[in-house]
Amino acid sequence: MHAEHADNRELNELSGRVIGCVFTVLNTLGAGFLEKANGNGLVYEVRAAGLSAVQQCGAKVHYRDTFVGKYFVDLLINDVLLVELKTPCLLLNFGKPRLEIKRLTNGLWSSACSACIAFLHLR
């Protein structure tokens, strides 16, 4: 995995559609549910929006051409967008010249289905 396409227009549009699905789940279920209920609701909404969604998808992680482990993402949308459902969430963006760090706890994002969305391109 690498984040070279983090500002790709198609990924930005896709993330907007997924965020819309997140708000639908939040408005339907309400706040306070665990990751599994929110994740299942989000998969339903994403698929209803005509997107593909795979839960607990495994991806091999390489560092400098060396396999360093396997990562299981909560949701993989359209084979390019990883969605992690966590609270609190620390979002690290390695796709910029300088590392961007955001801590999302009791704000809008954590209450909105606790979704941390990372833009990553899978190879």
Image: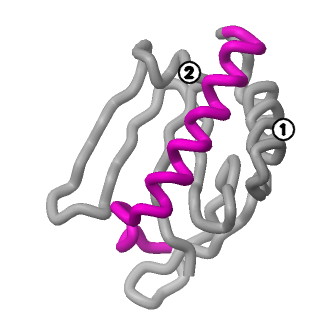
Give the image quarter of residue 42: top right
Span highlighted in magenta in the image: 1-30
The residue depicted at 56 percent of the width and 21 percent of the height is 112
The residue depicted at 37 percent of the width and 62 percent of the height is 6
What type is the residue that disc 1 sits on?
Tyr
Q: Which residue is mark 1?
A: 44
Residue 57, placed above or below residue 43:
below
Mainly helix, strand or loop, the magenta region? helix
The residue depicted at 23 percent of the width and 62 percent of the height is 96
Residue 121, placed above or below residue 22:
below
Q: Position of residue 53 (x, y in %)?
A: 77, 54
Give the image quarter of residue 57: bottom right
Residue 58, placed above or below residue 24:
below
Q: Position of residue 12 (x, y in %)?
A: 44, 53
Give the image quarter of residue 85: top right
- Helix, strand or loop at label 2? It is loop
The residue depicted at 33 percent of the width and 30 percent of the height is 103
Nearer-N-terminus badge (1/2): 1
Packing grade of label 2 (10 A; few <14, some 14-19, many >=20) is many
In magenta stretch: residue 46: no
Q: Which residue is mark 2?
A: 112
Left or right: where 116 falls relative to 54: left
What distance separates the C-alpha of mark 1 from that of mark 2? 16 Å
- Helix, strand or loop at label 1? It is helix
